[in-house]
Amino acid sequence: MFRQEFLSLCRVVAVLVALPTIVFAQQPPYDVFPDADPPYYRVRYDASTKAGELSFPVNYTIWIPNDVATLRGVVVHQHGCGEGSCKSGLTGAYDLHWQSLAKKHDCALLAASYEQPEGADCQMWCDPRNGSDAAFQKCLTDLGQQSGHPELANVPWALWGHSGGGHWAGGMVLLHPDRVAAAWLRSGVPLLEPNPDRPGIKAHTLSDGALRVPIMCNPGTKEGVTVKDGRFAGVWPANEAFFNGVRGKGGLISVAVDPLTAHECGNQRYFAIPWLDECLALRLPKNSGDPLRSMPTDDTWLAGPTGFDAAPTAEFVGDPLKAAWFPNQSVAKRWMQYVKDTSVEDATPPPAPSNLRVQSGQLSWEAEADLESGLSHFILERDGKFLANVPQQSKNPFGRPIFQGLQYSDTPTQPLASMSFTDKDAEPGTIHTYTVIAVNTLGLRSMPTQSE
């Protein structure tokens, strides 16, 4: 099902070069969307037949935190190549964990869903120069007008991308370094020099501006690091070449090898979100409209790209221009935990749920995800005694079980999980006291929230 994820990184279908005006449209269930009522907004653009413009239809959905007068940036969650991954993009803006990152920094959360049929060439969108750059910037203008936040057209971007989405995010860094606060590239990276193993994929130019953007390359160990064969074995050589090209010129780039996975996203969000959180805190301007701030360089740490130990720059043994770069000790410590077993520490409990409502045995509530460790489930109590877990059993085939479930490209499953429960055993006419407790993916519990 996800074969195109890899193939699209390695070759370009020649017929598409000969026929640049071909337009592809995906079949349902691309028309099955979660609702986009405020604070969600959506635009869709049809495919274009003009050379250089986007030849796939695309949907963009954005989430905007309540009570934000002026947005400071936008966090972009970009799916990978192939029909399955494109469909998974439909729910990217609804991810509670990624929303917690965006909200902390007064940012919007944006996710695209390209209508790419299986077998079509991913380069037609994952290379931003093929029309997806222009479509992305147009959506920011249109969604800004729709949501009453026209500043969206000009705010900085924090980019996350998986596979072909990593190729896209890296390409956007190279094209627009002054707009990108940071970029996390899961498995996919752009080319800096022509590569015979990736024929037809155009190389990018590395500018001085791009060297100042913090970038994290995040391949799975089974993508050519420890497993040297198989359909994803070419991912690490591509990442290594990109890393060496950027770091060799002093770029602020690092590598975090996922020790558990191949091409699936696994538990990467438990390092990706805190890493982006750190970068946004250091780079976003204090006043909207001002330029991005430079990353500090007075407390940097270094590590071997495929190693397990980091050290302060002054104590690092080896060539610093071949070493993974970290802005400070805090990030380096998380990196050492992640590359060991993905168990990034978290000592803080999740936020307590809010707005618990009870009517005739029907319970509903609201909650924000823990920034470091997300949400696993909720514990419900009735009159001080355990009632239920919601969901009864959290699921995730790719990593820690989470409340919303997880698809291949790190997005929630459909239908979206609901913060609600029906108490079928409540005694009619009896007023019960209900309690809800949030639990993050490390098992830490929030303070309880009780019904009135």
Image (cartoon, rainbow, N blue to C red):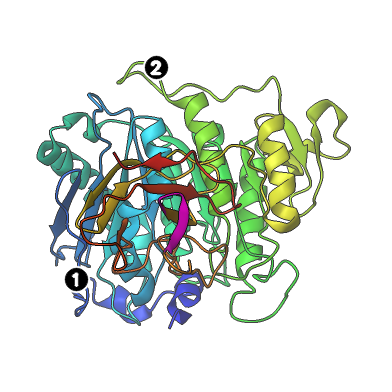
The percent coordinates of residue 264 (x first, y second) are: 54, 69
Q: Is residue 137 visible?
A: yes
Tell me the residue that label 1 is attached to.
32
* Callout 2 secondary element: loop
* Callout 1 secondary element: loop
**Identity, as a three-letter code, of the amino acid under mark 2:** Lys
The percent coordinates of residue 296 (x first, y second) are: 61, 22
Residue 3 in the figure: left or right of residue 443: left
**Identity, as a three-letter code, of the amino acid under mark 1:** Val
Nearest to the observer: residue 376 or residue 360:
360
Tell me the residue that label 2 is attached to.
286
The percent coordinates of residue 53 (x first, y second) are: 21, 59
Q: Is residue 170 visible?
A: no
Q: Is residue 76 above or below residue 9?
A: above
Quadrant including the C terminus = top left
Which residue is located at x 57 percent, y 65 percent? 399
**What range is drawn magenta here?**
382-390
Residue 74 forms part of the magenta stretch:
no
